[in-house]
């Protein structure tokens, strides 16, 4: 291309000089285009890398693989990919034919220091030449892969294509019909090992009619080994399995699975556990085994029961004396002991029991379980930047005391003392209650077992789970002061269970979850607010909550190799039903509510009655096949519904939904949206924080996340959502585009809720150092929920504070989801 442009340019010069074929301005434009094309071609030649190739050499630009056959090729794309994987070397990375890394490499060629050398070391890449390609070796590897996939008579040819100083290699593989499995024969014989191998046949990976595939045979050996390990064959190994394949048939094979004749005697017999030692205080300079052990249920327990009782440790041990060795139980014991949270390391070993002779073909193993303790007691203090979903941000502190065996049963007692100062700013606003002080103490006792009566549908020991179930008992008290609003004391008491049956799921049940919020000193501005808005008065009066809840979480994020990861969390909370039944049966006294109704009381307090359901769906799709890549598309949908009834017409204030802020719809302030099409009048702007809450929530978010530099990630996102009321609230009238009441009063309606969604979009930068993430998101509102009015539309009625068209910078800790 470069030479052709030179020819055009040399031919153009005399014509332009003698005849002026083009008008002056057109001639200048034409010459300008030619010079631009020439410069571009020169740069392209430089960046494509061919300029820096030694004379007589060719730049290797890659290879292609083509499969041909007279018969259909099963899973042709996967087979092609497998053949491509053996091609070496890899060509220089390119984008649209440009290879800038070769250019940077050239800058440092022959230099020992300086900017050019630094750029070469940092960003350069030496050209990969055609002379480095060994086509014979690559063809041999391809033939080997084809054999492994059942193509026993393949041919592979290569052809080199050159273009200027670049060369490309094409490989063509010709295959016939793949061989398939006709018969499968497992070992015969009545001795223990052949019988054990034959017993695994129902779960075999080898299927009659399937194509021959070496990887399937390899996986079958691993499967048999795992099955035998769970039947006591501790010393068995996959290498002791031999496959003999008869391929003399017409495109079919007979498979004979055998145990190698030279299998060691100790690998050919199952083992029974004899003596099991449990050492809970192991160290490299261990001397505890010289002490007299505690004998408990056949175990030898060291060193003593001063820290942990023998019962608490054996409850998490699934290796049993006089039982057949099973690797599944070994792995389960290791996982259970580590999940107690009281040991730093756990090690399990086995040795032949030499003092005990074999019996009926079985050998015997002695086992030791060595555990290194975490410190029994610890105290930790930390200063935090508190960032909450409701938009409050500020400094805080926490002092935590932990006792890892409070009752000698590996129960963890955790006591926290916390304090924080929080503030949410809003321009041109003197909103009351946005400055908050908190000080609290809470404690939780975590017991590593389920304390519950026997249940017919559940074995409370969860014998097949790798994770330790827990019973927790918690209590706490907190004092909150919101400036210019109120003081409030919060008391809570809860009792419940948490357990996992698999790595990906967790369940939490709280049969008892009691919360009591006592409104203390109030400011006149807040008192007048309660008088003006009965719904708010009711939500603050009914903050005596007697609830039970259940939550199920399914999370695939622990499966790092999966490109598509799903997260689901669903919870239901029931409050006040038993209290209402008790009150109605015993004729408990009633009290008048702020809106003139009558509501039951317990111990002189109105109690809340409601059902609340929360659902969260997330999906993370990684763009790259590399599991360490952060390039992904993340999506989330939140659905929340709280239904007050009987004793309540509104949810308690702390249970209501707000929307907007750094972890929600980021183009709007926290609690800056809804309910529905409600707009806060300027006259009530100082109390908008208490207005813009609701009983129903819908929110959807989508982000594209991209790795930029080490520890720096970027994102593009779009958010949408709103909240609504279940029962109308006349004090929060929604309006039409002209500022007139529309009669909806913030209630949810199926035929209009999509039009009432607030929408925003933006971009962000995240500093991610793995254990700590600082996030900067700039978001711009695309649509406000005021009857689908556009953001750029000016306020029609000046008595309402309509969202303007300015963007919003959000600074937060951690990812939004």
Image (tube, grey):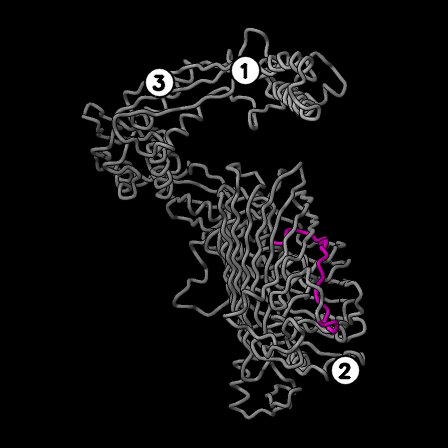
Please state which of residues 154 and 43 is positioned toward the viewer in this rendering: 43
Q: Residue at x 30, y 33 (%)?
A: 74
Q: Is residue 313 above or below residue 107?
A: below
370 lies left or right of 400: left
The residue that label 3 is drawn on is: 156
Q: Quadrant of residue 10?
A: top right
Q: Quadrant of residue 817?
A: bottom right
The residue that label 1 is drawn on is: 59
Q: Where residue 455 sits in the image (x, y, percent)?
A: 42, 68
Dominant secondary structure, magenta: loop
Q: Is residue 683 above or below residue 445?
A: below
Q: Marks 1 and 3, how far apart in space?
A: 23 Å
Earlier sequence position, callout 1 versus callout 3:
1
Q: Where residue 131 sits in the image (x, y, percent)?
A: 51, 11
Q: Is residue 399 magenta?
A: no
Does the residue at mark 1 contact the one at mark 3 (Cβ under 8 Å)? no
The residue that label 2 is drawn on is: 528
Earlier sequence position, callout 3 versus callout 2:
3
Q: Marks 1 and 2, how far apart in space?
A: 81 Å
For the magenta stretch, what is the residue range?
Answer: 797-817
């Amino acid at each position: 291309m470069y030479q052709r442009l030179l020819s055009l340019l040399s031919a153009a010069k005399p014509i332009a000089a003698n005849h002026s074929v083009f008008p002056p301005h057109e001639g200048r434009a034409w010459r300008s285009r030619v010079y631009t094309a020439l410069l571009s071609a020169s740069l392209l030649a430089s960046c494509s890398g061919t300029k820096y190739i030694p004379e007589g050499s060719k730049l290797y630009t890659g290879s292609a693989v083509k499969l041909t056959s007279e018969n259909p090729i099963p899973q042709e794309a996967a087979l092609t990919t497998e053949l491509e994987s053996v091609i070496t070397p890899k060509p220089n990375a390119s984008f649209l034919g440009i290879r800038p890394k070769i250019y940077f490499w050239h800058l440092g060629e022959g230099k020992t220091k300086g900017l050019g050398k630094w750029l070469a070391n940092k960003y350069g890449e030496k050209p990969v030449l055609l002379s480095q390609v060994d086509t014979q070796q690559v063809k041999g590897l391809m033939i080997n892969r084809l054999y492994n996939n059942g193509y026993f008579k393949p041919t592979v040819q290569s052809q080199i294509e050159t273009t200027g100083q670049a060369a490309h290699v094409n490989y063509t593989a010709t295959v016939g019909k793949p061989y398939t499995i006709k018969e499968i024969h497992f070992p015969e014989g009545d001795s223990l090992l052949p019988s054990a191998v034959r017993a695994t046949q129902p779960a075999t990976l080898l299927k009659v009619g399937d194509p021959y595939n070496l990887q399937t045979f390899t996986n079958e050996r691993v499967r048999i080994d795992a099955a035998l390990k769970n039947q006591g064959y501790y010393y068995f190994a996959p290498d002791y399995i031999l496959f003999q394949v008869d391929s003399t048939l017409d495109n079919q094979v007979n498979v004979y699975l055998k145990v190698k004749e030279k299998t060691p005697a100790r690998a050919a017999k199952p083992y029974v556990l004899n003596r099991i030692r449990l050492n809970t205080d192991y160290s490299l300079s261990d001397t505890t085994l010289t002490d007299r052990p505690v004998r408990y249920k056949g175990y030898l327990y060291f060193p003593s029961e001063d820290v942990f009782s023998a019962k608490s440790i054996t409850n998490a041990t699934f290796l049993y004396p006089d039982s057949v060795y099973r690797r599944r139980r070994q792995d389960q014991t290791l996982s259970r002991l580590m999940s107690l949270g009281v040991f730093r390391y756990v090690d399990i070993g086995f040795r032949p029991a030499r003092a005990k002779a074999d019996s009926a073909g079985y050998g015997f193993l002695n086992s030791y379980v060595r555990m290194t303790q975490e410190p029994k007691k610890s105290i930790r203090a930390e200063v935090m930047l508190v960032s909450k979903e409701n938009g409050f941000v500020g400094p805080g502190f926490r002092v935590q005391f932990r006792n890892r065996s409070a009752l000698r049963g590996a129960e963890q007692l955790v006591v926290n003392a916390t304090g924080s100062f929080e503030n949410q700013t809003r321009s041109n606003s003197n909103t009351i209650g946005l400055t908050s002080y908190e000080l609290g103490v809470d404690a939780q006792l975590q017991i590593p077992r389920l304390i519950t009566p026997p249940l017919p549908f559940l074995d409370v020991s969860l014998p097949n789970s790798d994770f330790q179930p827990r019973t927790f008992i918690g209590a706490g008290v907190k004092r909150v002061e919101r400036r210019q609003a109120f003081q409030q004391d919060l008391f809570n008491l809860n009792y419940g269970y948490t357990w996992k049956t698999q790595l990906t799921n967790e369940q939490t049940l709280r049969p008892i979850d009691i919360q009591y919020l006592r409104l203390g000193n109030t400011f006149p501005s807040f008192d007048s607010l309660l008088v003006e808005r009965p719904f708010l008065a009711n939500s603050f009066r009914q903050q005596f909550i007697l609830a039970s809840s259940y939550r199920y979480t399914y999370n695939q994020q622990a499966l790092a190799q999966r490109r598509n990861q799903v997260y689901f969390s669903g919870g239901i909370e029931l409050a006040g039903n038993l209290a209402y039944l008790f009150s109605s049966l015993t004729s408990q006294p009633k009290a008048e509510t702020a809106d003139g109704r009558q509501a039951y009381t317990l111990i002189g307090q109105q109690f809340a009655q409601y059902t609340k359901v929360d659902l969260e769906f997330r999906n993370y799709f990684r763009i790259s096949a590399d599991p360490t890549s952060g390039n992904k598309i993340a999506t989330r949908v939140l659905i929340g519904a709280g239904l007050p009834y009987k004793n309540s017409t509104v949810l308690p204030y702390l249970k209501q939904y707000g929307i907007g802020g750094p972890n929600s719809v980021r183009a709007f302030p926290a609690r800056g949206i809804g309910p529905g099409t409600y707009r806060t009048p300027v006259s009530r702007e100082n109390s908008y924080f208490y207005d813009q809450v609701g009983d129903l929530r819908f929110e959807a978010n989508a982000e594209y996340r991209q790795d930029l530099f080490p520890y720096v990630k970027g994102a593009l996102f779009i958010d949408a959502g709103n909240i609504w009321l279940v029962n109308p609230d006349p004090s929060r009238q929604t309006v039409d585009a002209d500022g007139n009441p529309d009669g909806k009063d913030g209630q949810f309606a199926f035929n209009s809720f999509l039009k009432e969604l607030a929408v925003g979009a933006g971009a962000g930068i995240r500093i991610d150092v793995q254990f700590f993430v600082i996030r900067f998101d700039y978001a711009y509102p695309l649509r406000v929920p005021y009857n689908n009015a556009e953001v750029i539309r000016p306020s029609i009625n000046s008595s309402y504070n309509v969202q303007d068209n300015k963007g919003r910078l959000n600074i937060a800790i951690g990812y939004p989801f």
